[in-house]
Amino acid sequence: MDVRTLRLMVPRPIRELPADLAAVVVLVLAADVAALAPLIRETPLRIPLGLALVLFLPGYTFVAALFPEAGESPTGDGVAPDADSTAADTDRDAENAGSDGTAEESDAGRSLLSTPPTVRGIDGIERVALSFGLSIAIVPLLGLVLNFTPWGIRLVPIVLTVTGFTIGATVVAAVRRWDLPPEERFRVPYRQWVDAAATELFEPETRVDTALNVALALSVVLAVGAVGFAILVPPQGEQFSAIYYLTEDEDGELVADGYPSELVRGESATLVVGVDNHEHERTEYTVVLVEQRVEFVNGSTGEPVTRSTGNSSANATAVVADQRELNRFQTTLSHNESWHHEHEVTPTFTGENVRIVWLLFPGGDAPAEPSMADTEYAVHLWLDVAEANESGE
């Protein structure tokens, strides 16, 4: 089957859709895929397509529906009459004056015949300007309508609403163009633009024009490249992860308060560990929960000191006398995503210097016997753990 046969198999309304409106439909569908498809929506492709869907396409189709007819620039074609045509007009006026009457009557008749017809449409520059302006007005109105619906202002409802409006306006614009005679329909002059650009670039009148055209082309390329790079590759800023622990209050809210300070050996405390991902990429995490028996030693004398004295003394050194792993948790988070995990903490060591430590390892790999020196992300909680018989049980 050749290309012509395949083209004839396409339904006639789609086959005869004007080129600019067909391009609008293709861009709208591409923007929907870039915004909603699971894998493609994470690529930089969604940014330029999303901007086109929000800032240009709705207004362009709305203008196309309002003005289906071709228009002219307010200055006309800009071509001045040459000397031969002027001389011919003068001779014709003289003949008319000699045979039919005065020259004034001939001038009046010619002025009526040369009056250009009234142009109902608008030119390309006006269409582009109105497309941006109307898009900025239409999209917020669609969002306002969505705000009073059960769907609300969310990604999927907004994308579908803007898409529906744009496609609907495209259908109206196509029908209104088809109702006009072919010579009155608006068409985007692609070939004229290409021919004019080729003439200016490759057939300049002077060398100065050549240099100016090259400089203009380079400046446009640099400007588009700079804007595209700024949009597609924004600065990431600082990359880091965070770990913390919370408790649940009487209303079921997570708060950074109400932590246990005293437990009996074998007794459990319910805590919630939280992890935040600010790595600007999808990251796997491993959280290792350990308990440590810590001893404080005076750095100058080497004598043991209490925890309160060690915490307040600059010369005291904390030494981990014993450590035991209690649990491990794993999760995978996207950028700017958080994870909260409720779990039980049941210490087995006793004494006043029991430290519960949560160690966070981005990347998912954690040592078999981890310590606080193996990662830069760790939080701890001090506990006084008593023997069961000391509490009277």
Image (tube, rainbow, N blue to C red):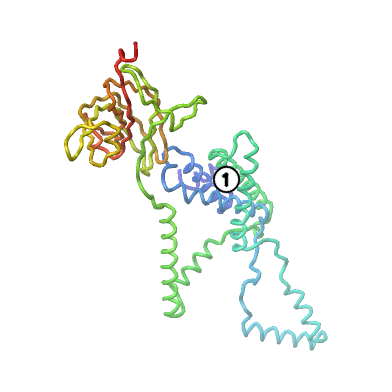
Q: Residue at x 26, y 21 (%)?
A: 349
| Amino acid type of the residue that numbered disc 1 sits on in the rendered structure | Ile
Q: Identify residue for label 1.
A: 14
Q: Quadrant of residue 14?
A: top right
| Residue, far right | 101
Query: Taking 141 as reference, is 96 left or right?
Result: right
Q: Quadrant of residue 270?
A: top left
Where disc 1 sits, the SS reads: helix
Q: Position of residue 57 (x, y in %)?
A: 57, 51
Q: Is residue 127 above or below residue 261?
A: below
Query: Taking 83 as reference, is 386 left or right?
Result: left
Image quadrant holding the C terminus, namely top left
Q: Nearer the viewer, residue 385 or 140?
A: 385
Q: How many marks?
A: 1
Q: Nearer the viewer, residue 211 or 382?
A: 382
Q: Quadrant of residue 10?
A: top right
Q: Position of residue 173 (x, y in %)?
A: 64, 50
Image quadrant holding the N terminus, namely top left
Q: Position of residue 154 (x, y in %)?
A: 55, 39
Q: Is residue 113 above or below residue 138?
A: below
Q: Residue at x 73, y 73 (%)?
A: 115
Q: Nearer the viewer, residue 249 or 68?
A: 249
The crowding category of the residue bearing disc 1, from other C-alpha atoms within 10 Å (few below 14, some 14 to 19, many at least 20), is few
Q: Nearer the viewer, residue 166 or 247?
A: 247
